[in-house]
């Protein structure tokens, strides 16, 4: 399987998890699904791996236990960063690699 195809599958799985779990709360099942998807990618593309690491860090806060230090509006900011920015960058990388024949 081409790297671009693996990245696209990863993005699809991340999107499915995020869309099904859009509320910031303790959710170990969502984190397990995200870890599984990230593990399936492997170390094949450093750019995508970097974006997945960023996304997983945000997801740990978003799906972690409520924190006394969480600021109002922070969960919406994390959601926007994960679902919008980082997921879009991952999908864009798959398109770039596919255009290059990978």
Image (tube, rainbow, N blue to C red):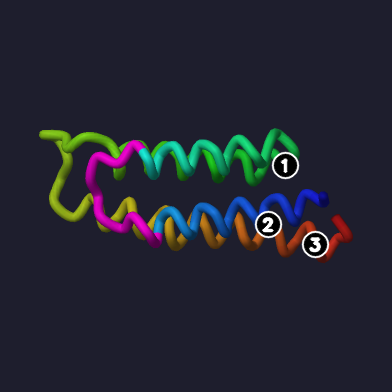
Instruction: Give the CA separation, mark 2 to mark 1.
Output: 9 Å
**Residue 10 in the image: x percent, y percent?**
61, 51
The residue at 47%/59% (across/down) is 16
Instruction: Give the CA separation, mark 1 to mark 3.
Output: 13 Å
**Residue 36 in the image: x percent, y percent?**
54, 38
- Kindly indicate the quadrant of the structure image that contains residue 58: top left
Query: Which residue in the protein does label 2 denote?
Result: 93
Query: Which residue in the protein does label 1 denote?
Result: 45
- Horizontal side of 91 relative to 76 (left or right) equals right
Do the numbered discs 2 and 1 sit on residues whose CB atoms are within 8 Å? yes
- Kindly indicate the quadrant of the structure image that contains residue 29: top left
Task: Give whichever of 11, 99 is nearer the camera.
Answer: 11
The residue at 52%/57% (across/down) is 87
**Residue 50 in the image: x percent, y percent?**
58, 39
Q: Which range of residues does the magenta coloring cover?
A: 19-28
- Horizontal side of 29 relative to 87 (left or right) equals left
The residue at 54%/62% (across/down) is 88
* Residue 32 included in the magenta stretch of the image: no
**Residue 90 in the image: x percent, y percent?**
60, 55
**Which label is found at residue 84?**
none
Query: Which residue in the protein does label 3 denote?
Result: 98
Badge 3 crowding class, 10 Å Cα cut-off, few under 14, some 14 to 19, many 20 or more, is: some
């Amino acid at each position: 399987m081409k790297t671009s195809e693996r990245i696209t599958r990863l993005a699809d799985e991340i999107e499915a998890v995020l869309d099904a779990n859009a509320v910031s709360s303790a959710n170990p099942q969502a984190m397990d699904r995200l870890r599984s998807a990230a593990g399936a990618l492997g170390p094949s593309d450093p750019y995508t791996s970097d974006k997945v690491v960023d996304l997983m860090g945000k997801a740990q806060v978003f799906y972690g236990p409520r924190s006394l230090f969480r600021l109002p509006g922070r969960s919406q900011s994390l959601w926007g960063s994960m679902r919008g920015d980082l997921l879009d960058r991952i999908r864009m990388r798959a398109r770039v690699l596919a255009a290059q024949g990978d």
